[in-house]
Image (tube, rainbow, N blue to C red):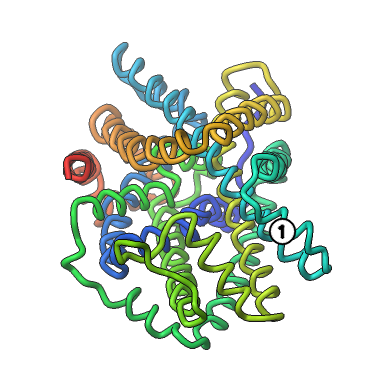
Amino acid sequence: MASREQFSSKTGFIMAAAGSAIGLGNIWGFPTQTASNGGAAFVLVYFILAFCLAYPALMAELIIGRHARANVFTALRGIATGPFTRFLGGFVGGYGVLVASLILSFYAIVAGWMLAYLGEAIARLLGMDQLAGWLISFGFERNMLLMGLFMMLTMAIIAKGIEGGIEKWSTRLMPMLLIILIALIGYVLTQSGAQEGLRVYLLPDLSQVRPVLILDAMGQAFFSLSLGVGTMLVYGSYLDEKESLPKLGAAVTLVDAGIAFIAGLLIIPAIYVAKEHGATIFNDSGELIAGPDLIFQVLPALFNSMGEVGVLVALAFFVLMSIASLTSSISMLEVPVSFATEETKASRKQATLIIGLLIFCVSSLILSYFEQLFSLVIDLTTVYSQPLLGLLLCVFVGWIWHRDNLLQELSKGHPTISETWFWKIWPSYVKIFCPILILATFVQGVIG
């Protein structure tokens, strides 16, 4: 096997890990989940779960990854203590690779829609109205073409490796994303109706906190931080030993949750601005429209109502969404590619091409049977599989891997870690409380 690449800097890792976390899961998923779960109550529960469940699970992945210097399959088998745990490690790792690939298969479809609306804004600016109309039509050919284009962009970055691909593009795209996001918020908050949206977003109604909201918030926290499928474990495997993992993990969690919150400051007020412009923002049952209809019906209606400036706002918004899509998709593709390059004789370019084409085929199947498969794949992967895989990763760190090995790995980048509150709390927390909380929340939500 070739020598293993590493991130060249701490900033490079944080940008790449934050880019993985800050994708459609934050800028599309988080606000739409907020809209469909009562507004500020969902925000409150999400933040609690992000730090009480997602951060400890993130640390479990980073520690295993840096220790093993390998893909998720090999890493979990490597810390096993016997035949059964070795089999379990292989199963969890293999299922994580599968789930990451399935997430990318539906993610590429949604990202293709973002590219379509970005292209529509450009076509309108150029006066190409017929092309603009085709780009926003929900047709099989359009969906296939744009999904394929997005997969090609993702594959091109992954084929270049860690420093020349993932790190290089993450450090370029993330600052662009933040600048566009803040500029759009500044514009939207000056519009009529935005203040009503802010009240919905920032003032929680605790009566809205129900089991289904908690399950959605947990799924959102795991999905937005790319947990449970080995993404952060693989990124951790490319980290230098001198880095402090608890500090890096906290930085990634804070950046991720912060961007999710900031994205909500854009999307939720924009919904109510759209209402002021005559758009329908409530469904038949009186709840805010969420899901794909929010991004692809409510907001375009808002942009269209703004006249000439609306085209520029739409262009900036869908550039933002496309960048967010790409920073996340490259981390998802890295999971199966790292597995293939380390477990077979395939080169990085060969593995990227083969796996990318396989995921393209799965995406094509989902598009062919859209009504039956799209929501099913999303629920299977993000609502159910990711939390359960996160639970099993906590079990590996808390119950299977020896505590002394944990301390040894953490001490490499933080020699005094044994004297900190993190070491006094985290090992027991990830061993007992995290699995119980994840399982209890999961079961309650499913039954509810």
Residue 311 lies, in percent from the top left, at 69, 73
The correct choice, above or below, for 133 with respect to 446 in the image is below
Q: Quadrant of residue 338?
A: top right
Judging from the image, what secondary structure is the residue with disc 1 in? helix
Give the residue at x 48% y 79%.
273
Q: Which quarter of the image is occupied by the N terminus?
A: top right
Q: In this view of the protein, can residue 65 be seen by the observer?
A: no
Q: Is residue 275 left or right of residue 310?
A: left
Q: Is residue 330 left or right of residue 350?
A: left
Q: Which quarter of the image is occupied by the C terminus?
A: top left
Instruction: Please name whichever residue, 137 or 182, is drawn nearer the observer in this view of the structure.
Output: 137
Give the residue at x 72% y 45%.
164
* Dot 1 amino acid type: Gly
- Residue, disc 1: 133
Crowding around mark 1 (Cα neighbors within 10 Å: few <14, some 14 to 19, many 20+) is few
Give the residue at x 54% y 39%.
104
Q: In this view of the protein, can residue 122 be seen by the observer?
A: yes
Give the residue at x 26% y 67%.
41
Residue 5 lies, in percent from the top left, at 63, 37
Instruction: Please name whichever residue, 59 or 158, is drawn nearer the observer in this view of the structure.
Output: 158
Residue at far top of view:
83
Q: Quadrant of residue 198?
A: bottom left
Residue 226 lies, in percent from the top left, at 45, 45
The correct choice, above or below, for 282 with respect to 17 in the image is below
